[in-house]
Structures are given as C-alpha cells and as structure tokens.
Image (cartoon, rainbow, N blue to C red):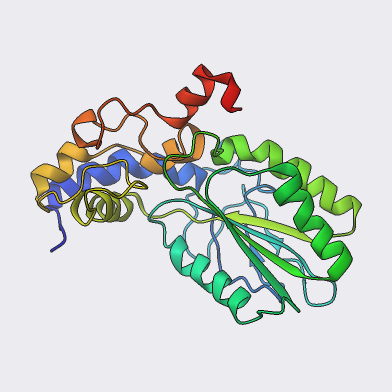
Amino acid sequence: MMLAVTATTKYVLVMVGVSILSMIVTFHQSRLLGGNSVISFEESLWNPAESPTIVTGDTYSAGWKQFPVPNFKESGGIFIHYHLYKTGGSTIGHFMEDLGKSDPEEETFFFRRIRKEVLWDAHCMAAIDKVANENKIVLYELHIEFPAPNYPTLVEMQLLLDRWRAAAKDRGVPFFAFTVLREPLAHALSFFNFFNVAGKPGQLWNPFQGEMEPTEENFLKTFQGNRQCIMLDLDAEGIFRAPKAVLRHPDIVPSHLRVKDNEETL
C-alpha cells in the first residue's frame, strides 16, 4: 500500500517545492551514439534575471544553453549520470549496466557504479585512459549509498567535473555528464514510500525508519521541503534537516558535517 495525499496537502507541498525548478536539469531524448540536444548540467548557464521562465518538457527558456550529446561512435567517450534518490535514475542506471553486461568482453562499453567516493586516479583518470587507449564508451553511474561521508553533492562535484572534463579534452576524449530531477511532490511521495514505508529493519543503506504506515500523517511527519535542492547542494544522502523522529538512529550526522568535523576523512 502506498500513500496518496489530499488536494490541500498537494497544493502546499507543490508551492513549497517549486523553488527546485530553478536548478532543474533535463535529460531529454539523449542517445549515446547520437547527437540529440539535451541540457548538460556542467555546461548550463541559468540567469533568472535574463529569463525566469520555468523549464518543462520540450520547451527551454532563453536562459538555458543547449548542448548535444557527443558522438561516441567513432572514438568512444565518457558518459556520466549523477543519480539522485527517487528521480527515475534507476531506470537509466540499469540501462547503462545492461549495456555493460551485454558486452562482457568490453569491446565497446565499460560500466561502473560508484557509491561511496569519487577518486581522481582510480575513477576519473582511469576512465580517460580507457577511452584514449581502447576507444571504449565508459558509462559511470554516480549513485550514493548511505553511509558515504566523502560522497560529493552536485555543487561539490562541479569542481571535479570541471577538472575531469578539462583533462578529457586535453586527451581528445568526449565527455558528457547529466543528472535528472523530479517534480517535487512526486519525489516526496516516492521518497516516503520507498524509505519510510517499504524500508526494512537492518538495511544498512537506509538511514530512515522503515515499515511506517502509509498515512498522510506519517508523510507530513517525515516531510522535508526541497529535499532535492538539499541533496544537490548540502547533503547528498538526503538526511540533512530530516526530522530526527524518522531517522533510524537520531544521532546520525549528515555527510557534510561528518566530513567537516573530521578532516581525516577527506
């Protein structure tokens, strides 16, 4: 059983969550071996003063710049998906993984899922080397799994992406990275149903209490406004500002605070 909410609650939550649209990144009809237009988060520029229009579907405001997915067919390339919880990213991740499994000899595709920490030599430079030396299409899914104190938010990841992209360009390696966001209410409901309702005791990757009743009261008790914004900017695990009553261990400290307080983990 999953939760549906009343019209009043829906209106309130949509109004609370609408600011996340200022950071929206659209993954739109892209193909690994093609060149359809998409918005790349590390190359996009959004100026609200220039164009406050909300981005939806096939319509992009003048404030966004569109960039094509590189053509990886001839010389390979690096294709990165920054996966936020409950944004439909599992479908993309499984598709990328299936490409890797369908090519066990790694003649064309190489897939890796990174859950704990993104390392420069072991992950970034290794991907560049594999493309430059073997003409592979390297598929990386960056998907956090609690607890991961060194896992970067997208804002923190920006610096690494810039460096990674520049290093790839120096070696003539095509590079493309993206993320996907979800309509705020749909995300909040999916997050609640997955972590708080369907979650089971003993799941180390789940910092939230599971097996809650799927009621509107419990949903509002667990609700955290603009959770996607927080995961993108402050805490990739999504527990920062979460009500302590819904955390499995009330003394859990968010990732960015753990790292800041213990420099040895950096």
The quadrant of the image that shows the C terminus is top right
Q: Residue at x 48, y 48 (%)?
A: 144
Could you say where residue 203 lies in the image, as x and y percent from the top left?
Answer: 30, 50
Q: Which percent across, then down, holds residue 230?
A: 42, 36
Using the image, determine if residue 150 lies above or below residue 35.
above
Relative side of 130 to 261, left or right? right
When the figure is inspected, residue 257 is found, relative to residue 236, above or below; the finding is: above
Residue at the image position 30 percent from the left and 51 percent from the top: 191
Q: Nearer the viewer, residue 175 or 199?
A: 199
Image-quadrant location for residue 235: top left
In x, y percent, where is residue 36? 67, 72
Residue at 75 percent across and 57 percent down: it is 127
Q: Toward the viewer: 177 or 13?
A: 177
In the displayed structure image, the side of residue 233 where residue 248 appears, left or right: left
Looking at the picture, does residue 42 appear above or below residue 243? below
Q: Picture coordinates of residue 214 (x, y %)?
A: 12, 53
**At 36% across and 43% down in the image, what residue appears?**
18
Q: Residue furthest bottom?
A: 102
Residue 203 is left or right of residue 234, and the answer is left
Q: Which of 196/23 is in front?
A: 196
Question: Going by the picture, which residue comes out furthest to the front?
Answer: 202
Q: How many marks?
A: 0
Classify the position of the N terminus by image quarter. bottom left
**Which residue appears farthest toward the top when viewing the image?**
261
